[in-house]
Amino acid sequence: MTVYRAGSRMIRYQTVSCYTASPRVTPLLLSLQRVSVAHNTFCNEFGLLAQSKSSTVNVSSSHRAYATRPASRPKAHTGRITTSPRGRKPKAAAIVTAETAETGPLPAIKSKSKAKSPSKKPKAKLEAKAKAKAKPKVKAKKAAPKRKVRARKPLTEEGIGAAAAKEKRKHVKELRILALSPPKLRPATAYTIINQELAKEQHALSSKESSQKYRHLIPEELEHYNHIAHQNKGANQQAYHAWIQSLTPDEIRKANNARNQLTRLGVKGYSRNLKDERQVKRPVQAHSFFLKDRFNSGDMHGMALPDATRLITREWRELDQADKQKYYDSQAQSQARYAQEVKDTYHRTADLSAITPAQAATAPAA
């Protein structure tokens, strides 16, 4: 007999382990099984604990037993409390005895709710869905609208002049960067020293005041200013030489070319080139050698320079080719010297295309 307690109420029912073939016993056993299943479900839903003393017992003595054979001895109870998961109906355990072996097992009670078997989808559909998830559709991006290009208006004469002036200013700015600026020098004359002292004392200074003070200097004061000017001149030479040596010969060459271009463009302050002994001297032409010889001869003494130059040029044109040969030889030597010095100093090849070639090879033999 299995006993379940629910508060102050006690529910008892008996589980019969065997039955006969009598038509009265079979319905009774089936009803008892249904009561047992329903009570187990009730206890599981409300958390009631089942305490069973014996798993299989005989029918109570107060009730008449319809079995022709005595029930088998019950098994020892293990004391385990069996609980089924919530919401599921436990299956009744079929107890096999000698009588059940003859008559067969009890009929199984079918549950009302049937578990739905998962429907098997064909592989083709599953593969198609997997491909659709793996490769999402890429939306085509709309092309950006093209910007309308406005047609430029033709430049007028004023616009052309303004564009040319702007280009010139840009070119002058680049040339000034290449021209380089030497260090600021100290005043190297007595007059400039006096002018500098007066400029420190007075914000507005006229050249007339400086000239007047310079004229009224006593000998001791003039000697003092001359001494300071001589010292400043020596310091300026040392500073300028150190600055020139800090630059490469090629940088100085580019600076002098830029200064010449600025002078031709009318920019003031760049008329003097930078002096450097490392600069390569250009080759001398044959006509220049002849001009030098004629001035050194003394025949042009007392003549004006334009007149002397005009006369020497006429003589060069009338000179025979045999007499010109020695001057062409000197020109060839000067060009060879120039090419070698350019290679050693500027580390590049000399361009002799702008120089008149020596005509020693074409000149007839004397």
Image (cartoon, rainbow, N blue to C red):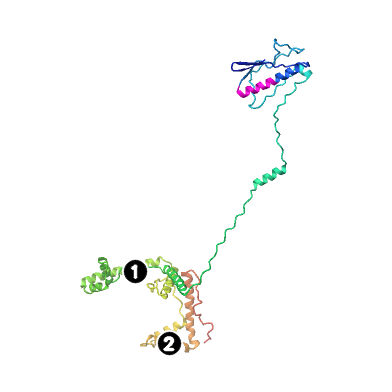
Residue 312 bears which disc, if any? 2
Inter-mark Cα distance, 1 to 2 = 40 Å
Residue at 41% x, 86% y is 309
Q: Is residue 322 left or right of residue 76?
A: left
> Contact (CB < 8 A) between labels 1 and 2?
no
Q: In the displayed image of the protein, which residue is found farthest to the top? A: 61
Residue 163 position, x and y percent, is: 46, 71
Q: What secondary structure is the stretch in magenta mostly built from?
A: helix
10 Å crowding of disc 2: few (<14), some (14-19), many (20+)? some
Judge by depth and name the residue closer to the eye, 237 or 273: 273
Judge by depth and name the residue closer to the eye, 88 or 338: 88
The disc, 1 or 2, on the residue closer to the chain's N-terminal end is 1
Residue assigned mark 1: 237
Judge by depth and name the residue closer to the eye, 117 or 193: 117
Residue 77 position, x and y percent, is: 66, 16
Residue 68 bears which disc, if any? none
Q: Is residue 10 left or right of residue 107?
A: left
Q: Is residue 218 left or right of residue 255?
A: left
Quadrant in which residue 294 is drawn? bottom left
Residue at 50% x, 87% y is 321
Residue 91 position, x and y percent, is: 69, 24
Q: Secondary structure at mark 2?
A: helix
**Quick check: 217 above or below 34?**
below
Q: Secondary structure at mark 1?
A: helix
Quadrant of the rendering where the N terminus is positioned: top right
Residue 339 position, x and y percent, is: 49, 74
**Which region is colored magenta?**
34-47
Q: Amino acid at mark 1?
A: Gln
Q: Amino acid at mark 2?
A: Ile
